[in-house]
Image (spheres, coloured by chain):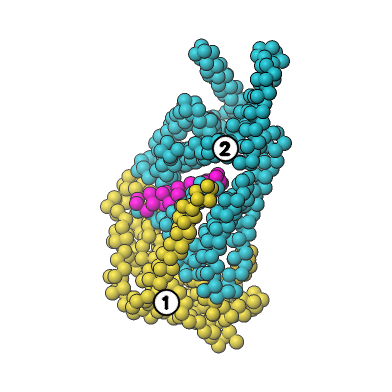
Chain colours: A cyan, B yellow
Amino acid sequence: MQQLSKSEAQERADRISAFQLELQQLERERVLQLSNAQRQALDDYHAGLVAQLSQSYDIDHDQRTRQLSLGMRIASFLGALALAASVFFLFYQYWGRINTSTQVTLLIAAPVFMFLVTMLIVARDQSGYFAKLAAMVAFACFVLNLVMLGQIFNITPSDKAFIVWAAFAFLLAYSCDARLLLAAGIICISAFISARTGTWSGMYWLDFGERPENFLPAAVIIFMVPQFIDHRHYWGFAPIYRVFGLLMLLLPVLVLANWGDASYIDADDELIEGGYQLAGFIISALAIWIGLRRQWAEVVNTGNVFFVIFLYTKMFDWWWEIMPKYLFFLIIGLTAILFLFIFKRLRSAGLLSIKEAR
Amino acid sequence: MKDSRLRKPLLIGIALLLLTNAVVLGGVYYNRAGDDVRRITLTERELTLPYRYGRNRENSGIALRLNYRVASGRAHKYYLSGSGSPAWFDRKKLALVGYDVSPSVDSEQGRRAYKKLRSREALLVLEYDGATYQAALDHAQKGLLEKRQQLDRDPHSDIYQNQLKNAERMLEREQTRNSRLFVIDVGNDEQSLRKQYADSARYIIVAGKVGISLHVVKGGVWELSGNIHSVAIREVTVPWKYRSLFEGILDRPRSSRVLQQAPRYQLSVAYGKRLEPWIIDAVSLPSAQ
């Protein structure tokens, strides 16, 4: 059997399950009838394949195991966050009572040790949950490592810490198939790019959040990553890049659409706000269009959400003061119904074109 | 097969962790090595202990807060806080730290351009127990004298009596408790500042954050001035070997700390090549007994 990722193996098992259910339905409706020999061969083949996939990749082969896996994922996520917080507070509680050499040794040893433990678990544990938990603790230890060295030796805060944290988070994310760590890596690298954009414009790096436009270069870079790097073997990674990219693009635009003073642009605030409001509509509409074309559901959904936010924000600006409140909310409700009709027609048109293509 | 696939990430991860720490510790060594280290002696007035509330109770480390002041050009002249617009931080100094001050403040467009400008990194010069502190002391003494004369003219006035008490408290604070560290200059060229302020026992050069301030003065005239925001390193961690000196003070009930008059400890602080500080000596003062 060719080497698959866990997500590819799970997809195969899900397809087999769906195929078996559909085959049963077709047989009941007398559309398709397999001979006993054919049916037996098919069942034997699928049973063997699912057993092999379960053993090799620890996949969910029925609804019960799927529900248990969801529970394990939640437990792993909460456990990881709690353990990471515990590491921080444990060190904070006791670090002042040990000498500097011991402090430094512990701070360096902790992430190295946890990283080794993580790699060991990755090599041994098929489920991946324990590995993700250990990886999160390793990342927390590395963040603590640099933060505490900075405190112990009174080091000037630097944005360069973000780049090494990002590198470590990405390494762990791709080694353990951990989407939470991928998100952490994206946040760190975006913070670095945004801080650098801020310093190139002359501002103090820690104040990079005061100019939302500092996030725009990072937004474009993050969104484009899946276009240049193949993520087929990492289920859910490409959507995370795209969603974060869109959020870093549309949130600053939303802020600037309401607060033009925060922009780099030297123009009247109302002009800036108007420009960004228009940009917000165009970008979110483009996101919906691209998402539909490329079948990127997450891009469509994000574009939808922001299009609605921009629309309702604009309606608020136009009508909240001059209209009775019941009328304002009635118009909002009617707009939502209008959107429902538009999406229904688009959906029907899409189904019709599929039928015609056949 | 899985183990061999993990070998590369394992090596990369270990190398990343060790190299990062090597760079950080190398930077610490670089900061503290060589002859460019400046040493200054400060007391509790300039490096204060934290309050033991909330999060700090969960943190066993002790960090002293650098307490410096700015002599503002406006109403409350000698601020107790570490931010403000000193009179010497004018248009010329703003240009020196990298701001474009060519737009005119008299035009709407010019004022909009200035309002757009954000804070920048700059070097701050802190003067310890120098001419600026002496001026603050003189200001408090002058204020007390004025209030005494006021009360002499109207001895039965409750308002004047209260004002005299406040003036006495202010002078007492200025003499025994307020920080003697003042920001007296800004710049971008560390070497020229080191040359200009060569007395390391009186001047510290630190990295900090400055901004631009646009305001209306008398007569409706717009004025441009610089604003001192903060220093980059506001807290200095106490090394473990001096911890016991501060633990006793921190463990005392808060009321006794408020009533204390004179500083209870003295510190020798060094600032290195990267302008990062560290404590090289700490002694308790007689008032701590």
| Magenta highlight on residue A196 | yes
Q: Residue at x 62, y 49 (%)?
A: A125
Q: Residues within 10 Å of mark 2 (few under 14, many from 20)?
A: some
Residue A204 visible in the shown view: yes
Q: Amino acid at mark 2?
A: Ser
| Magenta highlight on residue B77 | no
In the rendered structure, the answer to whether residue B121 lies left or right of residue B178 reads left
Q: Secondary structure at mark 1?
A: strand
Compared to B182, does A53 lie above or below? above
Residue A170: percent from the left, percent from the top? Answer: 49, 49
The span picked out in magenta is: A177-201
Q: Which residue is mark 1?
A: B270
Residue B259: percent from the left, percent from the top? Answer: 61, 78
Q: Residue at x 58, y 70 (%)?
A: A95
Q: Which residue is mark 2?
A: A7
Chain bearing tag 1 is: B
Q: Quadrant of the C terminus of chain B?
A: bottom right
Mark on residue A273? none
Place residue A116 in its image quadrant.
Answer: bottom right
